[in-house]
Amino acid sequence: MLGRRAFLRVLALPPYLWLAALLVAPIVLVVLISLRPEPGPVDFGDPWNPSLIQYWRILETPAYLRQLGISALMALIVALAATVLAYPLAYFLAFRAGDRASLYLVLLLVPFAVSFLLRVMAWRLMLGQEGALNTLLQSVGLTDEPLDLLLYSREAVVLTLIYVWVPFAALPIYAAMGRIDRRQLEAAADLGAGPWTRFVGVTLPLSLPGAVAALFMVFIPTVGEYVTPRLVGGSETYMYGQLIQDFFGRAASWATGGAAAVIMLVLTAVLILAGTLAVRTRVAT
């Protein structure tokens, strides 16, 4: 019979295999594709001669790097805004909801039951010339004619992505706040600290790891976003994810698309590592 440790390893084997098949293998495949010298569709029967020419093509093209910088900046704005807006929501669930916290948490998760595409399309309708926002602006007399600047702009993309990710960002912050020892807050109150002082001096530092987790959980998928910019951003808002999709799609340049994806992955990994080290240093001090 298997020992306890061997039995636990056997139980852990399926998740590891599943992780390797769905996460590690696709990344390895993209890296292998990016190292091919030919930019066209990949024929896996051809001899494999690894080359970095596709990486040089991306790094030597200012337009590609500009798209990466714009996408990273937009993703950072979305992540910061979603994290800040999620803080009051998480604070209410952790400290003010009481026995109804579970009910409110379920209500928070309700949007995830609706398709991501449908939620984005809803904002496309709201921001359109005959949408709810233009109708509201006209009804209160702020404008006489529908504004056509609401839709198909970077602002529309940022607004839509913030809406999509705020409930998601609230979850790790709520989990971090749930682990805070209430006795520390009571001790701060006994020493004369007001609500704001208790939040800044106790709640915020102790929930900072959850906030950083929320920040990266929003930033990582947003930096490679291409569905939302295509639907509400139009041709004027072209993000790095759309560039990668075009390389694999209409441009039929798989190797270049793979190199672009790997560069984005490396950049994201570096930012995550830097943020993690900063948080650990902050907590240690």
Image (cartoon, rainbow, N blue to C red):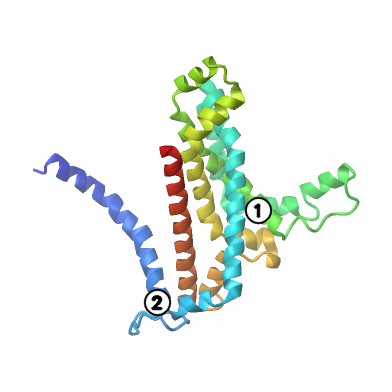
Query: What residue does disc 1 label?
Result: 158
Residue beneath the point at 54% across and 39% down: 170
Label 2 sits on a secondary structure element that is loop
Q: How much space separates mark 1 and mark 2, taking CA atoms?
A: 34 Å
Residue beneath the point at 55% across and 78% down: 251
The answer to whether residue 32 is seen in the rendering is yes
How crowded is the residue under tag 2: few (<14 C-alpha within 10 Å), some, or many (20+)?
many
Up/down of 150 relative to 258, above or below: above
Residue type, label 2: Leu
* Residue at the extreme front of the image, as rendered: 285
Query: x and y percent of residue 250 in the render?
Result: 56, 76
Query: x and y percent of residue 25 in the render?
Result: 35, 64
Residue type, label 1: Val
Label 1 sits on a secondary structure element that is helix
Residue 140 lies in quadrant: top right
The N terminus appears in which quarter of the rendering?
top left
Up/down of 6 relative to 103, above or below: below
Identify which residue, 104 or 243, lies in the foreground.
243
Query: What residue does disc 2 label?
Result: 35
Q: Which label number is shown at residue 77?
A: none
Side of 75 relative to 237 (left or right): left
Query: x and y percent of residue 169 in the render?
Result: 54, 42
Up/down of 188 relative to 267, above or below: above
Side of 36 relative to 212 (left or right): left
Identify which residue, 242 or 37, lies in the foreground.
37
Query: x and y percent of residue 83 in the render?
Result: 57, 43
